[in-house]
Amino acid sequence: MDQLNQLRLVWEEVLSIMAADLPERSFDAWLKDSRPVYLDGNTLYVEFPNEFTKDWVEARYVNPLTRTLRQVTNRDWDIKFTIPEGVRSLGAPSIIPGRSTASRDWGEPSRSQVPEEPAPAQQPQRIQTPRSSALNPRYTFENFVVGNSNRFAHAASLAVAEGPAKAYNPLFIYGGVGLGKTHLMHAIGHYALEQNPNISVVYVTSETFTNDLISAIGKKSMVDFRNKYRNADILLIDDIQFVAGKESTQEEFFHTFNALYEANRQLVISSDRPPKDIPTLEERLRSRFEWGLTADIQPPDLETRIAILRKKAKDDNLVIDQEILSYIATHIQSNIRELEGSLVRVIAHANLHNTPLTLETVADALKDILKTPAHQPVTIEGIMGTVADYYSIKVSELKSKRRTRNITFPRQIAMYLARDLTESSLPEIGEAFGGRDHSTVIHAIEKIESELKLDPSLQSTITELISLIRRG
């Protein structure tokens, strides 16, 4: 047996000892995928799958690993950490071009109605607040299925839960609907409370934050409002994109953010897009959201979708053939919520009709979801309508001569999709987009193809748009 193989056996023993001393979720996230790759004298080089994991282990586990290696081999070692050559740093995750979502109409007080921020000397008195406000017991790290699409966001969330306000503050998680952002936020709260039951964890949506603000103004109870949010040890704010355009809410959240950050309290924020793509968000908030770590979640790949279904079946005490799980996972690709909902629908269909679970039963149960596009022909107008809705712009703007990026990029995507999803010629596509010539269409297609090569995560946006277009 060569030296490297011997080292790998030794490292397996080191990991088994570490696994006994660490929570399973921590071991799986940080150490499980490590392996020795090189020996130089008394220096052992250990490889980790990405730079984010390497840096975290380097900061937290180098001494325990060194002691354990010394214990196993009865000699002194230096351990150096590395990552595979060519692996992109996960500390700078890729950006998914964001979906513009229309602002919800739940009302917003005028800025003049909000009482002025008290001077620094008038900090609200520390009061007892709910320790686990609104946390869903089902959303824990143990119940979160990790795959390539969410591994970075999961690791970042676990890092924050293990060391609130010590790792990444704020943590900003973004991704499409139903991909697990809320699950991770609740998991952070649960884990932190397990480690320290005396801390205060507050989870709210941005809608609840706005409604609480409106109520506090009406009842003249701004001190109570500020105590609730600014005395939290961990504040979890979901769907922050909905504060866009709400000046008073943004004003109040700005001061809430500052108060928590300066008091060394943890903020975790989620959105359906990265901070730079949230329209009408004040620049001072945008910059603060980017102070810490930004992590994206993408739609799960096939293997992860199968794993999610397998876990859902196990949790519900169901025994389902792999063939059936694979069929569902292959045909339902948009998000986790729809994936799990499809499994529930299939089980209910089989029970109601008293039929065994076969591929035919599954296909019949999901026939409305899996309608072939032949019944809903894709048109250029339909594509433009879907893309315009997705980015909260008007179809007329897609056809216009405007060249600002918030119009140009959706227009290029729409042209790219028109080429792929319709039988229209390039001149016909150009004509539909305000009488443009075919060379403009070619440029748009080449631009999107180039963007896909530079940023593969753009594919998730394209996939979601295709799904929306085909559903009509």
Image (spheres, rainbow, N blue to C red):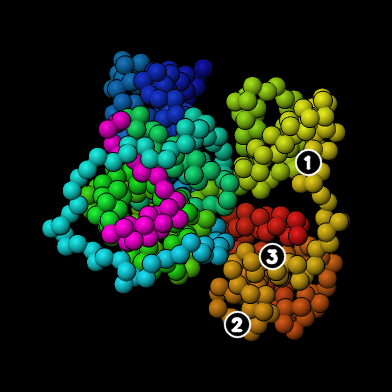
**Residue at image mark 3:** 386
> In the displayed structure, would residue 346 be above or below residue 440?
above
Q: Amino acid at mark 1?
A: Leu
Tell whether 388 sits left or right of 269: right
Magenta part of the chain: 196-220
Tell me the kind of residue under disc 2: Arg
Estimate the x, y position of residue 257 in percent, counting from the top left. Answer: 31, 56
| Residue 230 in sight | no
Q: From the image, tell me which residue sits under label 1.
A: 366
Q: Which residue is located at x 42 percent, y 40 percent?
A: 134
Query: Residue placed farthest to the left in the image?
Result: 121
Q: Say whether residue 203 is magenta.
A: yes
Q: Nearer the viewer, mark 2 or mark 3?
A: 3
- Please, which residue is most extreme toward the front here? 219
Q: Nearer the viewer, mark 1 or mark 2?
A: 1
At label 2, counting other C-alpha atoms closer than 10 Å, the crowd grade (few under 14, some 14-19, many 20 or more) is few
The image position of residue 206, as x and y in percent, is 43, 55
Residue 239: % across, % down = 47, 54
Label 3 crowding class (10 Å Cα cut-off): few <14, some 14-19, many 20+?
Answer: many
